[in-house]
Image (cartoon, helix red, strand yellow):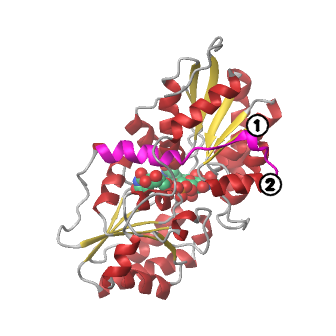
Amino acid sequence: MTSIPAHAPAKRKILCVVGTRPEGIKMAPVIRALVAAPWAEVRILATAQHRQLLDQVLGLFGITPDRDLDIMEDGQSLAGLTSRLLARVDEVLAEEKPDIVVAQGDTTTVFTMALCCYYRNIPFAHVEAGLRTFDRHSPFPEEMNRVVASYLADLHFAPTERAKANLLNEGVAPERIFVTGNTVIDALHYQAKRVDELDAYVDPAKRLILVTAHRRENFGAPLASICAAIAELAERYEDLHFLIPVHPNPNVAGTINSILGGLPRISLCEPLDYAQFVAALKRCYLVLTDSGGVQEEAPALGKPVLVMRTDTERPEAVEVGVARLVGTDRIVIFDEVSKLLTDNENYALMARGGSPYGDGYAAQRIVTAIANFIT
Ligand code: UD1
Ligand code: UDP
């Protein structure tokens, strides 16, 4: 339960911000918990840095934005997106005058909102704070977005003790950091209870491998190498079926469609709504991904996850042995997947489940900390 301070005065205005698909998923539990808090007047801003992907999530969670900047342009550049966001977000802050702003993660939406809050001296609460690779180019530009957001934030909701330690090392005051777990586990529990059936066709006789890829640092040759590995695996192992919901970023969709389109045992599909994606996670044998959120979700459902990156700001699952960094090299991916397909002991170790990222109550902890901060 959210604790409400006895002295709680008039309602406080909380502006919750969402820009992309993962922000929608990870903010949904926070928004729901805030809406239930009697001291909070909740306003929701969609920057719509993502259009279709964000709408899909907000629809599923029944969230209707009060304001929508409809900022996305096809093939948007980082600088173009950043400058449009800075101008429009600042207008919203000027008009809404919130008591606090809450945002999640490491996107351009979050970085620009944190900066605009700082300029207007409005407290900024950062959900999923303190994740670091310590490589400013990986993930790009997310590592830098997250570091800058930490410098600008007033409240830091760290999902793990390691994330908290990263923030302490950077000089963040301990009383401003709260270890809450990751709200993605709250969202996952909510959806996992509600849906079992996967609508997309997957051959029931085959082992399903779920694949997602979209990182900017993997555009071009690394993504082509990932696709080549998948093509070889599908050819070599006839009992596999690959399901690949293709991210609409043209740099991703172009490569995946041109290399993997039309190949047997490989289904390319539109992005799945979150309920369907969770159903696919539950149904699959293993996951290949460069996503942040999927690295957190797969272990929670007991699915081995091979991370197609050279480093991760989410090392906890790698350390406990339920995720493995495999990079983007064609041969390494082929070999690592083969190991899991052929070595039952190896598979069982990675499929034992248990999430280091939370217990499903992160949103309640976050709302309690916000209440204590602003009331
Ligand atoms: C963004 C985030 C990334 C996050 C990812 C989640 C930044 C810089 N990047 O990357 O951190 O991991 O979202 O998916 O903040 N597009 C559509 N429809 C959509 C969404 C995207 O058509 O609903 C296409 C558009 O052409 C758009 C392009 O994808 O210009 C890129 O979108 P953008 O948000 O800039 O980058 P992502 O790669 O999606
Ligand atoms: N996801 C989804 N449908 C898909 C692919 C992913 O709902 O077709 C969800 C996934 O469960 C996770 C989130 O989107 O919660 C991850 O988003 P993405 O990989 O785009 O971004 P990242 O987490 O890397 O920032």
Residue depicted at 57% across the width and 31% down the height: 367
Range of the magenta residues? Answer: 170-193
Q: Nearer the viewer, residue 77 or 32?
A: 32
Local SS, label 2 = loop
In the displayed structure, would residue 362 be above or below residue 304? above
Quadrant including the C terminus: top right
Residue 122 on image: x %, y %: 76, 29
Packing grade of label 2 (10 A; few <14, some 14-19, many >=20) is few
Q: Residue furthest left?
A: 205
Which quadrant of the picture is home to ligand 1? bottom right
Q: Nearer the viewer, residue 30 or 140?
A: 30
Q: Is residue 184 magenta?
A: yes
Residue depicted at 63% across the width and 32% down the height: 369
Instruction: Look at label 2 and name its amino acid.
Output: Glu
Residue 351 on image: x %, y %: 37, 69
Q: CA distance from mark 1 to mark 2?
A: 22 Å
Q: Are marks 1 and 2 in contact (CB under 8 Å)?
A: no
358 relative position to 93: left or right: left
Instruction: Look at label 1 and name its amino acid.
Output: Cys
Residue 247 on image: x %, y %: 46, 59
189 relative position to 317: left or right: left
**Which residue has dot 2 on it?**
170
Residue depicted at 70% across the width and 46% down the height: 111
In the displayed structure, would residue 128 be above or below residue 323? above
Q: Residue furthest top?
A: 10
Who comes first in sequence, dot 1 or dot 2? 1
Local SS, label 1 = helix
**Which residue has dot 1 on it?**
116
